[in-house]
Image (cartoon, rainbow, N blue to C red):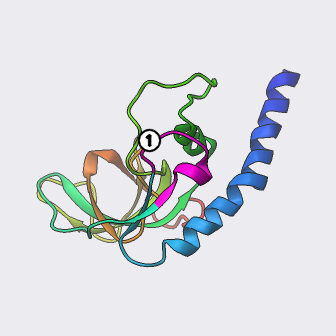
Amino acid sequence: FFFLSFLSFLLLLLRVILLRPIEMMLFRRCMSSHVAWRYSRHGAVSEVLERVSVPGGGSVGDGEVLVRFLAAGVTPMDVADMLGVNHVGRKEGRNVATAAGNIGVAEVRAVGTGVDRLSVGDWVVPGRARLGTWRSGDVVMSHSDLVPVPKGIPVEQA
């Protein structure tokens, strides 16, 4: 029990000391339109993370929605993804992600045909990891990868 408590404390300390400055850097730099943070190899965050211009949203197809991320956080999972390790410290054999970011909240800006559970103006969060939430501008995503957020929840808590 003590070990788990100590590990939880260390993870919290990591977030407060190391990840908060990264969150602020991403927030300041992503204010221009259609920017994403990506990595194409594993390694230290400062060495592998790069800011790239990406194409704007475009039109939505069947089962798709156009969203714009309002906020995105940095988690230990994001850092582990970039380092190439899983949650217990072993190297992963999966492909390197193209877009960084696992959590965030987005606003639905357009809805394609066949999407009945989301409407323009709804807020959504990723329903699976590695969708690439560290971005600005509009992006088209499958509605099945997104989960609606109940109305009235502040963006910081969504």
Q: Nearer the viewer, residue 26 or 153?
A: 26
Q: Quadrant of the N terminus?
A: top right
At 49% from the left edge and 71% from the top edge, which residue is drawn? Answer: 30
Residue 154 seen in this snapshot:
no
Q: Is residue 152 above or below residue 115?
A: below
At 61% from the left edge and 53% from the top edge, which residue is drawn? Answer: 46
Residue, disc 1: 129
Q: Nearer the viewer, residue 77 or 104?
A: 77
> Mark 1, residues whose alpha carbon is within 10 Å: few (<14), some, or many (≥20)?
few
> Furthest-bottom residue in view?
32
Span of residues in magenta: 39-50
Name the side, left or right, on which 96 lies relative to 91: left
> Furthest-right residue in view?
2
Q: Is residue 85 above or below residue 154?
A: above
Magenta stretch contains residue 1: no
At 31% from the left edge and 69% from the top edge, which residue is drawn? Answer: 138
Residue 59 picture location, percent across and down? 15, 67
Q: Is residue 25 above or below residue 92?
A: below
Name the side, left or right, on which 16 lies relative to 123: right
Magenta stretch contains residue 40: yes
Tell me the kind of residue under disc 1.
Ala
Residue 147 picture location, percent across and down? 38, 50
Name the side, left or right, on which 138 lies relative to 126: left
Q: Quadrant of residue 61?
A: bottom left
